[in-house]
Image (cartoon, grey):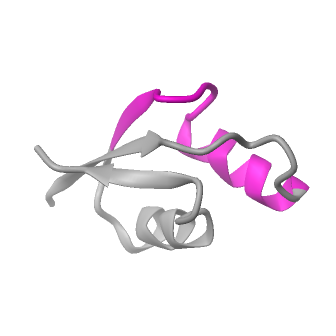
Amino acid sequence: MATIKIKQVKSRIGAPAVQKRTLDALGIKKMNQIVEHEATPAILGMVEKVKHLVKIVEE
């Protein structure tokens, strides 16, 4: 499968707890941090839930 790079571009402060847990599950702890994951349906679903806080970085 293809891999995607996810970068947090907006602060988690003020976000609902469920969105903070989703960022933690993706492995994102800080602003501008980039993590790499396989593009599975589960990961893409998590990215969709926090799409206003993260950005998919092109390789």
Q: Please state the total of marks drawn on the protein image.
A: 0
Q: Is residue 17 left or right of residue 32?
A: right
Point out the image quarter for the C terminus. top left
Residue at (87% x, 49% y) in the render = 14
- Horizontal and vertical percent for residue 34? 39, 31
Q: Quadrant of residue 56?
A: bottom left
> 24 or 10: which is nearer to us?
10
Q: Is residue 7 magenta?
A: no
> 14 or 45: which is nearer to us?
14
Point out the image quarter for the N terminus. bottom left
9 versus 22 height, above or below: above
Residue at (49% x, 52% y) in the render = 54
- Horizontal and vertical percent for residue 21? 77, 49
39 versus 49 height, above or below: above
17 versus 11 height, above or below: below
Q: Quadrant of residue 7?
A: top left
- Horizontal and vertical percent for residue 28? 57, 34
Residue at (34% x, 66% y) in the render = 40
Q: Is residue 22 left or right of residue 3?
A: right
Q: Which residues are magenta?
A: 17-36
- Horizontal and vertical percent for residue 5? 29, 44
Q: Is residue 28 magenta?
A: yes
Q: Quadrant of residue 35?
A: top left
47 versus 38 height, above or below: below
> 41 or 6: which is nearer to us?
6
Q: Is residue 17 left or right of residue 5?
A: right
